[in-house]
Image (tube, rainbow, N blue to C red):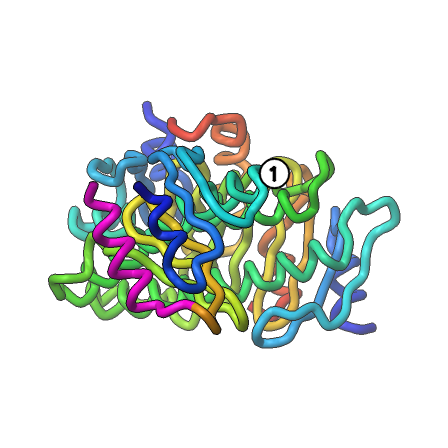
Amino acid sequence: MRIYTDLALMDGVVAAGEYSWRGDRYSYKGRLSDEMARMASIMCRATTLSTHMQSDILCTNINSKDCPFNESHGWIVRGPQFSVCVMANVFCFVENQPDALNRVFAFMRERLMDAEELV
Amino acid sequence: MSSLDKLMNLEGADAAFEFSPTGELTDHRLAEGSKLKSESLDLLAHTFVANIAIATMQARGWESSTGQGGFYPVQGFTLVGLEFSTVGNGECGVVLRNDSADFEAAYAALGS
Amino acid sequence: MIKRLLALDGVMAVCSFRDDGELVEGYGVLEESTMRRMAKFSHDYKRMVQGNTDQFSMFTGLSGWAPPGGWIVRGARTSVCSVGNLVCFIDNAEASLNEVMSDMTEVSRY
């Protein structure tokens, strides 16, 4: 089982997937069309690249080993009904139901926090 | 209790901060022993403004392209580091320890 | 070859970078360490702009935007502009942005 297939089975998860760092391949499972998964991969990859740059700049500026965001491991964006949680190259669309985001984050943190850049 | 003090009451809170609509730091609190400085919080505030703007563009594009709603208006962004995460919405943000972070409580405290 | 860009009015520094963000060569008023940071920033910024133009093309269906040709970040007194894997640090009061972008486009093809 891939991490995204495990994620897709969790309560409150709409869909989960992973994308290649070059941006040309993706896999997913859940309630998304193939085109939506392709778009989600492009969007998540773009934001991940941005957060890597931001954490680099942040930690260069803080200029110390104490920088808490050295380096960016992921990000979450919150909408009124859904949240998107991304770690390494794995993305997860989560419904905003009680505790779903915390469970998804805990699972992704356990499985992906130590990932190099690519799962 | 001020909104910053409420944010500092979240479990594992290391810092809480307020910023202008363009990301300049206007007020902040630091937990005892925090290694963060106001300059770092100012950068995090600008990070929120930038990412929420990009996420809003994505939500608008996604919703008009797919017909699937539920992402707009964006109600917050979180940057995840190795040990800490920072959660922001509107003109406030909080830095939390990952091992005890309750993101839903943080978003609720931020009015998301 | 990129050194010729320094001859343009207002160009204070120029550097080229690899696809992993490492500095290849740099000339001008910046110190080596700053030049390395500019190369890394420009590489990251290039990827970010690529991501944004990809999304714009995807959402609008418009052609002619991706891949992006370059980018400019305009500050109060200085700007950073890039084409391909080249980046210039310029003085706004002295430099002609059009001239710099045009010459960078030409040099980036060599």
- Residue at 70% x, 54% y: name it: B40
Prevailing SS of the magenta stretch: helix
- Residue at 23% x, 37% y: name it: A26
Q: Position of residue A85 (x, y in %)?
A: 45, 47
- The N terminus of chain C lies in quadrant: top left
- The residue range painted magenta reads C95-110
Kindly identify the amino acid type of the residue bearing the numbered disc 1.
Asn
Tell me the residue that label 1 is attached to: A70
Q: Can residue A79 be seen in this view?
A: no
- The C terminus of chain C lies in quadrant: top left
Q: Position of residue A108 (x, y in %)?
A: 48, 35
The residue marked by circle 1 belongs to what chain? A
Picture quadrant of residue B38: bottom right
**Could you classify mark 1 by the number of other residues whose Cα lies within 10 Å: few (under 14), some (14-19), or many (20 or more)?**
many
Q: Where is residue A53 in the image (x, y as percent from the top left)?
A: 48, 46
- Closest to the observer, C79 or B47: C79
- Residue at 88% x, 49% y: name it: B32
> Does B35 appear above or below C57?
above
> Does B27 appear above or below C42?
below
Report whether C96 appears left or right of C37.
left
Q: Where is residue C7 in the image (x, y as percent from the top left)?
A: 38, 55
- Closest to the observer, B47 or B73: B47
C101 magenta-colored: yes
